[in-house]
Amino acid sequence: MTWAWVIGLALAIFVVLAFVLKAPRKGWEAIGAALALGLAGFAMQASPNQAGAPKEPQQRADKSGAALIEARRELAGETAMANAPNRWMVIADALSRNGQFADAAGVVLGAVEQDPNNADAWLSLANNLMFHAEGTLTPAAQYAFGRAAAANPQHPGPAFFYGMALISNGKPAEGRAMWADLLARAPADAPWRADLEERLKRLDALMAQEPAGP
């Protein structure tokens, strides 16, 4: 009975996304893949036949998803007005907030297919791919970062998050260069300028502590 409910729920979600929200047909495959991934995860981890045992709710580590979204939106600033979140971005952000990064990446494909010049959508795709890969900068994420930067060269988000990705993937010098270039181009009154300056100072301090190579 549990499986019937789960499969029925997945089909209902697909119907809503495809026909009520009118997802582009090109995005149906991505939506189906995301739902199939969720069912596969349920199959591997769920134990619907076991008796329940009340437990204290655990604090979710998925708060990083919410922080990621807020940071992306803050960096977008006024540029977000030109690329207002569409229905795909709203759904993808909701999934990201719950730590469902693979599902979010699948859904946000609908946003970039609908508007290939939406820098915020490409950036969301890159970040979700990164988080799904547990922080690894995959070729797919690199491609999405590149498309985000090309879609809107004035958007600070791609350089900021790509720099962060390089730093966390063992390339601090490359990441620092990207951040330094972003800071040099930043308006004096940019609300995120002070935060970036502080991050660069901390990064420089950490890099100075690293032993010199042979």
Image: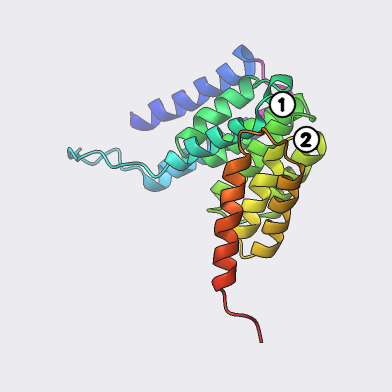
Q: Amino acid at mark 2?
A: Gln
Q: Judge whether 125 appears above or below 22 on screen.
A: below
Categorize mark 1 by other alpha carbons within 10 Å: few (<14), some (14-19), many (20+): some
- Residue 60 position in % (x across, y down): 36, 41
Determine the residue positioned at 66% across, 87% down.
214
Q: Label 1 belongs to which residue? A: 79
Determine the residue positioned at 47% across, 39% down.
99
Q: Nearer the viewer, residue 21 or 203?
A: 203
**Figure quadrant of residue 20:** top right
- Residue 193 position in % (x across, y down): 63, 40
Q: Determine whether the residue tagged by mark 2 lies in a helix, strand or loop.
A: loop
- Residue 153 position in % (x across, y down): 80, 37
**Number of on-image labels:** 2
Question: Start and end of the magenta stretch?
Answer: 22-28
Q: Label 2 belongs to which residue? A: 154
**Badge 1 vs badge 2, beta-carbon distance below 8 Å:** yes
Note whether residue 163 is visible.
yes
Q: Determine whether the residue tagged by mark 1 lies in a helix, strand or loop.
A: helix
